[in-house]
Amino acid sequence: MLSRWAHRHASWLFPAPAVVLVVTIIVYPIAYTGWMSLHEWFASSLTGPRFIGLANYGKIVLGDARFREAVVRTLYFTTLAVAAETLLGVAMALLFNREFWGRGLLRTLAILPMVATPTAIALVFVMMYHPTLGVANYLVSLVGLSPFRWTYSSQTALYALALVDVWQWTPLIMLIALAGLASLPREPYEAAHLDGATPLQALWHITLPLLRPALVVAILFRAIDALKTFDIIFVMTQGGPANSSETINILLFNQAFSYFNMGYSASMAVALFALVMGASLILIKVRRSTTW
Amino acid sequence: MADRRLTRRTFLKSVAAGVAAGPFVATPARAQGFTWKRFQGKELFLLLTKHPFIDVLEKNIPEFESLSGMKVKWETLPEIQARQKLTVEMTANSGGIDAFFTSLHVEKKRFWKAGWYHPLNKFLDDKSLTSPDFDWNDFTPGARAGVTQPDGSISALAAFIDANVVFYRKDLFGSKGVTPPKTLADLEPLVQKLHAPPATYGIVLRGLKNANATQYPSILFPMGGTYLKDGKAALDTKEQVAALELYTRLLRQYGPPGVVNFNWYECSASFMQGQVAMYMDGVNFASQFEDAAKSKVVGKVGYAVLPSGPGGHFSPIYITGMAVSSQSRSKEAAYLFTQWATNKANMVRELMAGVGVGRTSTWDNPDVKAKPKMPADWYQAYQASLKIGRQGLPEIVGVTEYRDIIGVAIQKGIEGAPAAQVLAQAQKEFQDLLNRTES
Amino acid sequence: MRGGARRRWLSTAGFYALAGLFMLPTVFVFYWMITLSLKPQIEATAYPPSFVRFSVTLAGYREVFTKYPFFLYTWNSLVVATGCTLLGLAVGLPAAYSIAHWRQQRLAVMILVARIIPGIAYLIPWYIFFRSLRMVDTYGALILTHLIVGLPIIIWVMISFFEDVPPDLEDAGLIDGCSHLGVFWRIALPLVKPGVVATAILSFVFSWNNFLFSVILAGRTTRTLPIAVYTMISYEEINWGTLAAAATLITLPVLLVALLAQRHIVTGLTFGAVKQ
């Protein structure tokens, strides 16, 4: 009896534990943040939060140029980093998807960048990027170029940071792409081979389209994380020089833990959430069009 | 009105204070002598910042535990993470932190307004709670003022005072036949003479926004500028423009490449690797400069007081201290710890390890004088700077935001924007900040 | 024949050259980090940088082990990361299967929301929440909160893999009298093993490196490894040697886990191929 009931209701029994877990953990933070965003409070134990309605949101949309600039910068950084990571990640996955000597070791080494503690990596890069003491400029000088300013100039800071992000997170895309390649069915390739297709044609017409769903998920998660990038920017430039690398999350953190502007930072968190949600929904739609 | 001088010795007063101190006083009716073991068996939790003062203190905490019979647990984190954790716990009203290390130049008014500091006046007056040799008046006037709020309440016990000094390469100065700058007018020609890229850059100062705001007053104050005048923003005065122009010009023309985003670690790395002739920053970086395992310029570093200027002779100072959390459930016990951490014995230990302190007597202590860890001119420069010490940052609630405002202005200046223009913008933002938060 | 053999040799050499090129940035930065962990402070920032010839010191590693209960931290990180990953797989795999099978798009988006919420927004409410349950400084709190980062990625990546399972196989199973659970366990799951391994690694790594939640919710008994790295940053000094040593040591366990797990990601040759 129980098994028949379970069989009929499998479609919600299967996801139930995950959904219950997630909802339990996130419902209070969502409620708290939403509530706080409608108030003004400076973390005082003496005066409680003061209700101000949608004033915080009004300020974000109309009054805060710094926030708007941060939005543009965040989108730009994300697009740059994720595009580079996708190209490199897929290329590396295609390259490593074969039997070769040292395969296991190489593929494990390849994921090293995302395994290391982000803060430690950021600090190591800080010194590597040092204009006169750093090894980055040393290598640059070896190939005959003039030294770069990396994170030490408002012109180049964002790009230097994107480089660190690409270095660190390309393995994520590579890992998922590799797993995807490993599960590709054999039949289409056999058919293509019989039809006389070249490896390049097989790649373009069979591999990449079949890989797309998993790939879009990888891009989705990278985009979500990149839009919220915090560690490397915080450690390496703190949003500088002169706010040239300030993204929404950095601004948010500042508002909460430096300016103690709890209500305002909560509304920024909501705005960031909306932005990332929007981007995610677009990517989800892209993915949907490839499967159903 | 709380009178914090310990010369008050009225029996009734101490009893009243004892009663007011709460349920931890065992026998309120009888006057108690001071004893460390008063709260024997209690457990304290401290939130400490990774800081040279704390490095020395941590090693001695077991001494406090045996002295007081209390159990002490603590967590040490870098400043920003420590403040983050404190904020989360205080906003959640957890009561989990009893005492914490506070950076007053960042937190003083903010935490006071939020009601996070427990005022220590009553405790200091209470002879049953304060050891007879604690001597509040031994702290320098600057230190005492630094921990006292406008309403007279004492928020923390001063531990460490950071003063700004000049670090210079004695060898390079000697070979060019120059001496450390006495006035601001000497500064630029001096730096220009020493500037010999790429082997040597004339000067390095912090460029990173927010971080630069603590070194900028080294030029601002002697130039006659300041951040506030009668409670209003004063960022667009003629003196301020001159100060910003000098600071940014020095870095733009004589600083190492990329200095616009240098925090103290890039600056001190450049200096220790011998790439820079002169560096002005907080006095505590010196202990690394004299460590052969870390510095290529050991023995070549000279220490001098900052140059004076038309506005006077000042050294920006920044104070940190030990505070008791207003949410602590064992406030008196926490107070015992804070007073132990800042007592004469511990301060001597700190200074012997090369960490500057806020007590006057420590500097004359015979042990300190007998075994100096640092060169003589470091002590001289430090003490002289304390005498001309002046709070480097405005004591306002939004001080961090002020640091970002002026910090960005400085960065823009270093990258070439005209000083008057960036300061006009900063002035607007600062006044707006004051209107918003200082009411 | 000679032409064919030479062509094969060239393509193999070309392959290794290309692989080397891609791996160069990774190898270099890690090599640099390791040398930093072995150099005395004065050489850490020296210029020109020394790549091979430098004085080796183990002071960094020694300091890491003596200053911190490193083994305790490692154990804590291990417990939390493993717990989080196992729990994530246990609830995530069925959920992913269900979403793929019954096209429950909305559930998927709901779970994604957890990952989208900025981490900072979680801090204060979670602290209040767990404190009221007296769960601060427990493994439970850390595992649950780290799950927020790992579970969405497990579910979403696995959705793609479950979608690739041929429906005829599933239908055949059902017709044969298998329950949904049986189809899931015996038919679908073995086919998506590469995905399971990949997401398990990712979930483990994300939990291992998580600093923000740990610093707020962990206490003395449950403190995790990333905090050890942070405490190298002091008021007036960054201890490069110890920092790099700590960072290096922290990556080792995860590398081991990844190496062991990667054996299960079979290449396309057995299941589908991009032939040479």
Image (tube, rainbow, N blue to C red):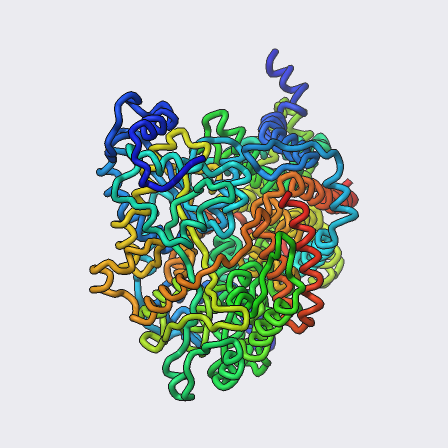
Image quadrant for the C terminus of chain C? Answer: bottom right
Q: Is residue A184 visible?
A: no
> x, y (%) of residue B71?
29, 34
> x, y (%) of residue A198?
72, 63
Number of numbered discs overlaid on the protein picture? 0
Image quarter for residue B272?
bottom left
Image quarter for residue B1?
top left
> x, y (%) of residue C221?
37, 37
Image quadrant for the N terminus of chain C? Answer: bottom right
Furthest-top residue in this view = A1
Image quarter for residue B62?
top left
Relative to residue C224, is residue C28 depicted above or below?
Answer: below
- Observer-nearest of B48 and B148: B148
- Image position of C116 (left or right of C86): right
Instruction: Identify the residue at image location x=28%, y=32%.
Output: B128
- Observer-nearest of B334 and A173: B334
> x, y (%) of residue B425?
71, 61
Relative to residue B187, is residue A233 depicted above or below?
Answer: above
- Observer-nearest of A36 and B335: B335
Q: Is residue B260 visible?
A: yes
- Observer-nearest of B345 and A74: B345
Instruction: Identify the residue at image location x=62%, y=45%.
Output: B438
